[in-house]
Amino acid sequence: MTTPIIDQTTITSLLAALFLLLIAYTTSLRLLPRSTPPTLRTLYIWHLFDALIHFLFEGSFLYNCFFTYTSIPHTSDYPHPASLTSPGVYFLGHEDRLYGSIYGTSPTAGLWQEYAKADKRWGGADLTVISLEILTVFAAGPLAVYVSELIRRNDSGGKLWFWGSVLATGELYGGFMTFAPEWLTGSPNLDTSNFMYLWVYLVFFNMLWVFFPLCVLYQAYGNIGLAFARAGGAVGVDRKVK
C-alpha cells in the first residue's frame, strides 16, 4: 500500500463535503418541528445534503467537462481522452481539445483533480460518467429538493414515498452504471493502492449513495404496504356496511 498525498486540496475538499452536511443538518434544525420523527429528520438531512452535492459538486464537474479544456495538435485519429471509444470519436465534436477538470486551475477543478487520484475518469470527460451526471444534476438534484420539501411540509404520505423511491432507485442505478464498466474491464481507472483512495474516496463516499437509498426503499416498502393494508381494511368495512 502506498502513502496518499494529503495536501491543502485534499483537506479543503473533505471540509467542503463536511460543510454541506453541516448546512443540511442546521437547516433541519431551523425548518423541521422538534416533534419530527428521527427517521424523517435523518431522511430530510440526507436528501438536502444529496441535493447540495448534486448541484454544487457534481454541477461543477459538468461545468469543467464542458468548459475546461486544453488544446492539442490537430489530428484525425486522436481517441477520446478518458473513454474506451474508437479513434475518430471526439467529445463535443472538437478534434483539437481535451476536456476535463484535470486541465483546469479553479477550486472546483482542484476538487475533481483530487477525486481523480482515486478514479481517473473524473479528471477527464468520460462519456458514461458525463451522461449519468447530467441526469444526476438536472433530475436527481431537483427531485431531492422536492423530497426534502415534502418532509418539511409533513407530507409523509404517498407522494413522499413514491418520489423518494424513484430517486433512490435512480441513485442506485447510477452508482452501478458508474462502476460496472470498471469492474468489467479490470478497474483500469481506479487506484486502490492506499487507504485514502480506496476506503475514503471510493468506498465510503460512494457507499453513502447505496446505504441511504436502500434505507429509503426499505421505509417506502413498509409505508406503502401499510397504506394498502389500511385501504383494503377500509374497503372491507365499507362493503359490510352496505
Image (cartoon, rainbow, N blue to C red):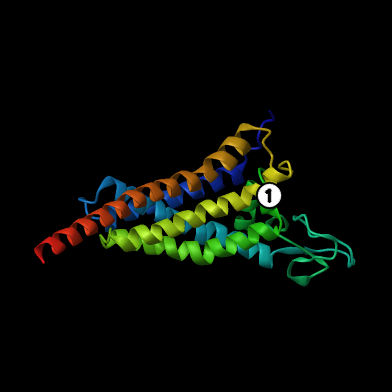
Say if 206 sits above or below 125 in the image.
above
SS at badge 1: helix
The quadrant of the image that shows the N terminus is: top right
Residue 105 seen in the figure: no
Q: Is residue 159 left or right of residue 101?
A: left
Residue 6: x %, y % from top left:
62, 38
Q: Residue at the location (68% across, 43% down)?
A: 183
Residue 61: x %, y % from top left:
61, 59
Q: Residues within 10 Å of mark 1 (few under 14, many from 20)?
A: some
Q: Is residue 228 left or right of residue 128?
A: left
Q: Residue at the location (48% across, 55% down)?
A: 169
The quadrant of the image that shows the C terminus is: bottom left
Say if 201 sits above or below 92 in the image.
above
Comparing 16 with 129, the one in front is 129
Q: Residue at the location (51% across, 58% down)?
A: 54
Residue 79: x %, y % from top left:
83, 59
Q: Quadrant of residue 67?
A: bottom right
Residue under label 1, please give it: 181
Comparing 141 with 68, the one in front is 141
Residue 206: x %, y % from top left:
54, 45
Q: Quadrant of residue 118?
A: top right
Q: Quadrant of residue 186?
A: top right
Q: Residue at the location (63% across, 47% down)?
A: 179
Q: Is residue 212 left or right of residue 76?
A: left
Amino acid type for the residue under numbered disc 1: Pro
Say if 196 sits above or below 220 in the image.
above
Residue 146 seen in the figure: yes
